[in-house]
Each structure stands twice: as C-alpha cells, then as structure tokens.
Amino acid sequence: MAKHILKCTGCGHYSLKSICPSCQSQTIPPKPAKYSPEDPYGHYRRQVKRSELIARGLL
C-alpha cells in the first residue's frame, strides 16, 4: 500500500492503492517529476518555449 495519494489513469479518481478500486486501472502520482539540473531534455524545452514566445511577439 502506498503512503502517497495516487491518481487513476482511467477514471481520474484519487486513491492510495496502486490499482483503482472503482475501475481497476493503474494509478500514478499526480505531480510532475522532481527538477534535476542534469535534465537531458531541458535544452529542447527551452527552445520550444522561446519559439512560442517569438511567435506570440513577446520576445
């Protein structure tokens, strides 16, 4: 049994179990992964964000 709240991938309900009690789907943590300074994809995310800001005329 998990000690943190989890969110069902099927129905969206929250539970403490790894399998949703209402629809029997897998549950996952509802929050994003922790920040890491050695993020291998950070450069690409910053490129996309920059191009979106340029497209909107904000940069």
Image (spheres, rainbow, N blue to C red):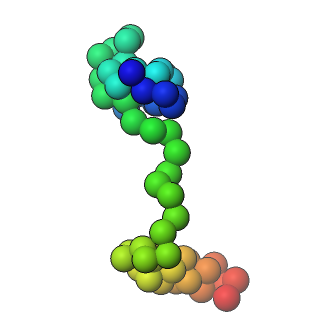
Q: Residue furthest right?
A: 58
Q: Is residue 35 left or right of residue 23?
A: right
Q: Is residue 35 left or right of residue 41?
A: right
Report x, y in % for residue 20. 37, 19
- The quarter of the displayed image where residue 9 is located: top left
How many callouts does the rendering have?
Answer: 0
User: Which quadrant would the C terminus be assigned to in this image?
Assistant: bottom right
Tell me what residue is drawn at x 50 percent, y 39 percent. 30
- The quarter of the displayed image where residue 23 is located: top left
Residue 28 showing in the rendered view:
yes
Vertical relation: 9 (above or below) 47: above
Report x, y in % for residue 52. 55, 77
Tell me what residue is drawn at x 43 percent, y 77 percent. 38
Report x, y in % for residue 19. 32, 21
Tell me what residue is drawn at x 39 percent, y 36 percent. 28
Tell me what residue is drawn at x 46 percent, y 54 percent. 33
